[in-house]
Image (cartoon, grey):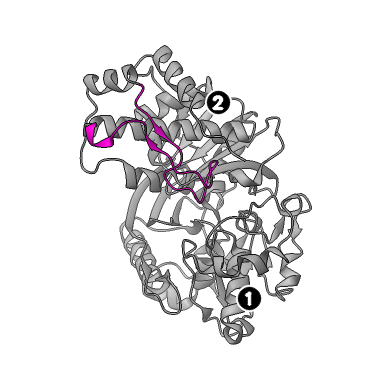
Amino acid sequence: MSAIRKVAVIDIGKTNAKVILHDLEEGREIDMRSKRNEVTGHSPYPHFAVDDLFDFVLEALAAFQQAHGVDAISVTTHGATAALLKRDGTLALPVLDYEYTGPDETRAAYERIRPSFAETGSPRLAMGLNIGAQLFWQKSRFPEAFAEIDCVLPYPQYWGFRLTGRRASEATSWGCHTDLWSPRSGRFSSLVRELGLCGKMGELVKADDRLGEVLPEIAKKTGLAAACPVFAGIHDSNASLLPHLWSRAQPFCVVSTGTWVVAMAVGGDTPALDEGRDTLINVNAYGDPVPSARFMGGRVFEFAAPGGHVTVSETDRKAMLKNRIMMMPSVFGDTGPFQGVIGGWTVDEHHLTPGMRLLGVSWYLALMTAVCLDLVGGSGPVIVEGPFAENHDYLSMLSAATGRPVEKSPGSGTSAGAAGLAVGGVKLSAFTPHPEPLSGLAELNRYAQIWRERLPEVA
């Protein structure tokens, strides 16, 4: 087929699912469809409605093909999710929601076979945040169904399988706190053998490998060309990182924001990582280890920030700074750098205006991001991807707390990185240096210092 210009990116986030059409020649998004990513039912456990999602994907692809034409398809998704296929390609078990607490039931037994942090760079996490813990629990609770597994696929490659029929996997998803990958050796960890899954982990490919062409029935349903290629795809945080690996001198840091805030340090001096503080070793698209730390920032914003359209007034700013009103970690104590600690506002939150509340949450998220960057030895400029890149107060406090330049990435770096897999690189629009903070840098520096002094001790 002709040169690839328009790439449809299937972008499945934990909260929202999107299909985005990129024009690589113009370096911009030209169309987008989105829907809520639903977790459905409780039988046999909470799981993702993958068939509904796939119908949504096909409808978006058909609309893009009719309106613009589609030259190729790429995929990026959240991590901590795997699809367990039977020989006939159907699911042996539903795709488990990683926020389900079921895997905690077998925690003690799992600990006895789980590889060390030194082997995997993967911290032990709650719920189903380690895919290895999911698989161990599923094997314990559903042995007959588990025995039918013919192939385990990471979530990005599951959608590639639905489109092409090829069963593949790649390192960015296996290297995302799964316990299943050894990032320093570039191969599966000893856990795969312990789970009896040797030879069942999906053919290893690179993120930019061409899986194949869309299946004939997909082409017929969507109007896509029969030769439309589908690329293997990538874990979403690593998709955010990829455009910067293509274009920037090291060192630098990328902060991917969404349901999760993931801070990734490239080219710095990495300290000893503390698995008890949700630090980990991610694996980038080239298979290289990337020190990372994270917390559920988007979920915190949904929970703690006021809803609706809220404006922060100058009076709100002055009151927050003068009275040192702060939110302290953690909002959710089961992930992030302060696990087991529940904090909150330093004053009665009922006395806060909506503007004060929004400002305090924005600053809290920035200060938590700065802690994550410290934990992984981040240095150089900080590039913010995703929805928090549009939050001026978050960017201001992040700059004050880190003492380093902060830039916001244009558009969706996640989908741009995934789109670029089809051509080996992308042209991004210019990055935007963060403007002067509205509250004054000195005042924000002092606020950040006091917040750090108030932090709880972590064992």
Q: Is 260 situated left or right of 300 in this image?
A: right
- Magenta highlight on residue 281: no
- Magenta highlight on residue 343: yes
Viewer-nearest residue: 161 or 379? 379
The numbered disc on residue 405 is none
Determine the CA span between mark 1 and mark 2. Answer: 41 Å
Of the two numbered discs 1 and 2 on the same chain, state the one appearing first in sequence: 1
Residue 330 drawn at (x, y percent): 45, 41
Q: Residue drawn 34% across and 19% down?
A: 321
Residue 15 drawn at (x, y percent): 38, 56
For the C terminus, give its image quadrant: top right
Q: Is 195 situated left or right of 166 in this image?
A: right
Local crowd size for mark 1, using a 10 Å CA cut-off: few (<14), some (14–19), many (≥20): many
Residue ranking furthest to the right:
185
The numbered disc on residue 381 is 2
Local crowd size for mark 2, using a 10 Å CA cut-off: few (<14), some (14–19), many (≥20): some
Bounds of the magenta segment: 324-351
Q: Which amino acid does label 1 sit on?
A: Cys
Q: Mark 1 points at which residue?
A: 151
Q: Is residue 65 visible?
A: yes
Residue 70 drawn at (x, y percent): 42, 58
Question: In the structure shown, which secondary structural element does the residue marked by tag 1 occupy?
Answer: strand
